[in-house]
Image (cartoon, rainbow, N blue to C red):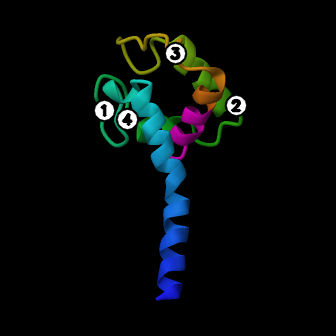
């Protein structure tokens, strides 16, 4: 029983950052246009993660796009600027997005 509880606690601890980042993405309205595994208005996070996989500056590049917005990389629909997202939050979101491939 004790071993089961420890395993469960470790599993929950490992999963918490993913839920916390999903919560941040939801609270900053990212999920209105993006989903983890399917295209909505913008690309899925899996598509973004795959596109930027292996790029050393990917977190900084995506964080800047999150804050400033962008156009043309994924089609004609522009991603609006998100001034409600600060730099630390943008980097946290970008790092989380890059875990999806």
Q: Is residue 38 magenta?
A: no
The span picked out in magenta is: 92-99
For numbered disc 4, what is the local secondary structure?
Answer: loop
The quadrant where residue 95 appears:
top right
Residue that numbered label 4 is attached to: 44
The numbered mark at residue 68 is none
Q: Are marks 2 and 4 in contact (CB under 8 Å)?
A: no
The quadrant where residue 61 appears:
top right
Q: CA–CA distance between discs 2 and 4?
A: 20 Å
Q: Position of residue 87 (x, y in %)?
A: 65, 22
Q: Is residue 61 above or below residue 49?
A: above
**Nearer to us: label 3 or label 4:** 3
Q: CA–CA distance between discs 2 and 3?
A: 23 Å
Give whichever of discs 2 and 3 has the lower sequence position. Answer: 2
Give whichever of discs 3 and 1 has the lower sequence position. Answer: 1
The quadrant where residue 59 appears:
top right
The numbered mark at residue 39 is 1
**Nearer to us: label 2 or label 3:** 3
Residue 81 shown left or right of residue 75 in the figure = right
The numbered mark at residue 57 is 2
Q: CA–CA distance between discs 4 and 1?
A: 5 Å
* Residue drawn where x is 41% and y is 21% of the image: 74
Residue that numbered label 3 is attached to: 84
For numbered disc 3, what is the local secondary structure?
Answer: loop
Q: Position of residue 50 (x, y in %)?
A: 50, 41
* Residue drawn where x is 49% and y is 44% of the image: 20
Q: CA–CA distance between discs 3 and 1?
A: 23 Å
Q: Is residue 92 visible?
A: yes
Q: Are marks 1 and 2 in contact (CB under 8 Å)?
A: no
Q: Are marks 4 and 1 in contact (CB under 8 Å)?
A: yes
Q: Nearer the viewer, residue 30 or 47?
A: 30
Give whichever of discs 4 and 1 has the lower sequence position. Answer: 1
């Amino acid at each position: 029983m004790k071993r089961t509880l420890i395993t469960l606690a470790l599993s929950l601890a490992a999963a918490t950052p993913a839920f916390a980042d999903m919560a941040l993405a939801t609270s900053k309205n990212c999920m209105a246009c993006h989903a983890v595994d399917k295209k909505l208005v913008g690309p899925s996070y899996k598509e973004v993660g795959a596109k930027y996989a292996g790029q050393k500056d990917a977190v900084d590049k995506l964080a800047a796009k999150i804050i400033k917005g962008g156009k043309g990389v994924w089609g004609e629909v522009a991603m609006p600027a998100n001034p409600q997202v600060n730099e630390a939050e943008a980097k946290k979101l970008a790092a989380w997005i890059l875990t999806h491939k």
